[in-house]
Image: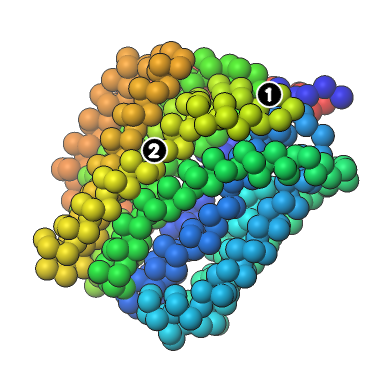
């Protein structure tokens, strides 16, 4: 049986469509929480989400290598990777539980011990999903999209039952995520059942642990850089955290467009098609730019629908900054995929430790430390001297400092990639996207900003239609996009036969 060629655009369309559908489920889940929980309880939800990544540090270290090995057809990589990550899952969960006496008082979780224990299960699950999704992304990235739909739909339904109907509040919110994760994991396991029958390759584990030194180095850097959000929670308390986590799910919708390039990394890795990067930039920015404009022009309406009484409307500046941050991160993701895809250091039987240490990968792995040098001292000074302990100012300044650092890091990444391989930037297409976004922005500026859920969704849909209408009038490629999508789907269907 021959290895199937990764259909970059098909996988991207499936994942992006899944993400767009889950915009509704995500809004629904957020509305359930914001309209059911008091603001300080929602802030506690945010603080737990700031904490969790520090105990999932290793969840992506081995999957980085799993995907590379699976993409290159290495026998038994999937099963070996899942078992390796399961071992890390046990260690991380035990560490999380062991830090209980320190974390509860430091974060103000004394009254949330049952929730704290529930989160340990979520941490365990995240390790499993990291290994499973890495295996699928290497060969069948669209199945990650299917899993996303299943998981997000389940989460919304469970949240309604557990939080709204049964009134379980914060425990119900985390239970809905835990059960939804379990359903998604079951779906992934079923798809990978053939791979799970193959022999475990312990030699891979040795290589991954050795190579993961650099991944862990990078992940630690990311977590150090994220200390700025611990500062936000500690200095600003539940209210600052609530402002940030009210704006974040809305801004994160912009990053969904990055899933149009989800298969870019394994495509370059397995087939060395660097030219796909330009197409990915076009597709991603075609949607990311108008989404960013929408968040910049209509932040108050999006925040108003979260809870009656305009509780989260003061977070408008936080949402605007996060919208720009999301756009920067989305573009950065494309260039990171290119760089990781063109590196061939692990083509050999063993991962060359010294070569990795001298490679461009190591430079990119070091970027979070540069980010930390920029943000942490700056944030400490600003949050302790210029905010007057105002939760909104703390949330706003922390977000702005973090976004400025992301911009600086992106410029460094861009230079590194362009020196390694020339990625053609489709400036003409980008100009058309901005031109088409202009009438949309004018409409959003002139139209009275709605304050209800349905009217906000209707105005957003009309603005999107204005953008697409103008874009299709001036851009032939945009007009052909539906045909391309249908062709990719037909090709995928015929290849299965």
Judge by depth and name the residue closer to the eye, 83 or 425.
83
Q: List the residue tagged with mark 1.
A: 347
Identify which residue is drawn at 19% across, 36% down: 442
Q: In the rendering, at what x and y percent does residue 41 appear?
A: 38, 77
* Residue lying furthest front: 354
The answer to whether 180 is drawn above or below residue 116 in the figure is above
Q: Secondary structure at mark 1?
A: loop
Q: In the rendering, at what x and y percent does residue 467 appear?
A: 32, 31
Q: In the rendering, at what x and y percent does residue 322 appear?
A: 30, 48
- In the displayed structure, does residue 401 sit left or right of residue 217? left
Residue 455 in sight in this render:
no
> Image quadrant of residue 118?
bottom right
The C terminus lies in which quarter of the figure? top right
Q: Secondary structure at mark 2?
A: helix
Residue 437 in sight in this render:
yes
- In the displayed structure, does residue 264 sit left or right of residue 81? left
Counting every numbered tag in the picture gives: 2
Identify which residue is drawn at 40% across, 16% down: 419
> Image quadrant of residue 51?
bottom left
Q: List the residue tagged with mark 2.
A: 367
């Amino acid at each position: 049986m021959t290895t199937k060629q990764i259909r970059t655009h098909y996988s991207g369309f499936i994942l992006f469509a899944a993400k767009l559908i889950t915009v509704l489920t995500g809004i629904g889940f957020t509305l359930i929480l914001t309209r059911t929980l008091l603001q300080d309880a929602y802030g506690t939800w945010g603080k737990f989400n700031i904490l969790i990544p520090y105990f999932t540090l290793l969840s992506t270290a081995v999957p980085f290598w799993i995907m590379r090995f699976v993409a290159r057809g290495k026998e038994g990589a999937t099963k070996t990777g899942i078992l390796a990550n399961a071992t890390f899952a046990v260690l991380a969960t035990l560490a999380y539980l062991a830090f209980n006496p320190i974390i509860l008082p430091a974060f103000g979780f004394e009254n949330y011990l049952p929730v704290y224990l529930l989160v340990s299960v979520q941490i365990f699950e995240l390790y499993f999903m990291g290994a499973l999704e890495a295996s699928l992304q290497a060969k069948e990235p669209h199945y990650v999209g299917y899993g996303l739909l299943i998981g997000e739909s389940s989460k919304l339904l469970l949240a309604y039952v557990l939080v709204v109907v049964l009134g379980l509040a914060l425990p119900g919110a985390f239970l809905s995520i835990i059960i939804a994760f379990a359903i998604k994991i079951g779906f992934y396991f079923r798809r990978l059942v053939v791979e799970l029958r193959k022999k475990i390759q312990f030699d891979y584990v040795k290589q991954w642990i050795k190579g993961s030194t650099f991944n862990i180095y990078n992940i630690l850097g990311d977590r150090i850089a994220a200390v700025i959000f611990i500062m936000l929670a500690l200095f600003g308390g539940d209210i600052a955290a609530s402002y940030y986590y009210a704006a974040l799910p809305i801004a994160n919708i912009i990053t969904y467009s990055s899933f149009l390039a989800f298969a870019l990394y394994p495509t370059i890795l397995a087939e060395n098609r660097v030219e796909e990067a330009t197409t990915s930039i076009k597709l991603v920015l075609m949607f990311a730019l108008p989404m960013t404009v929408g968040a910049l022009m209509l932040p108050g309406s999006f925040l108003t629908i979260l809870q009656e009484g305009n509780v989260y409307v003061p977070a408008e500046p936080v949402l605007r900054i996060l919208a720009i941050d999301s756009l920067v991160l989305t573009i950065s993701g494309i260039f990171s995929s290119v760089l990781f895809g063109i590196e061939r250091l692990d083509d050999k039987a063993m991962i060359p430790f010294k070569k990795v240490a001298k490679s461009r990968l190591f430079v990119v792995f070091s970027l979070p430390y540069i980010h930390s040098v920029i943000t942490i001292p700056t944030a400490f000074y600003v949050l302790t001297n210029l905010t007057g302990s105002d939760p909104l100012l703390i949330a706003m300044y922390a977000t702005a400092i973090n976004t400025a650092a992301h911009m600086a890091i992106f410029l460094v990444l861009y230079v590194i990639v362009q020196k390694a391989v020339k990625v053609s930037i489709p400036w003409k297409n980008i100009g058309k996207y901005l031109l088409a976004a202009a009438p949309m922005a004018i409409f959003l500026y002139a139209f009275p900003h709605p304050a209800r859920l349905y009217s906000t969704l209707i105005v957003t849909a009309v603005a999107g239609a204005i953008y697409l209408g103008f874009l299709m009038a001036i851009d032939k490629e945009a007009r052909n996009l539906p045909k391309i999508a249908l062709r990719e789907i037909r090709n995928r269907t015929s290849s299965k036969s």
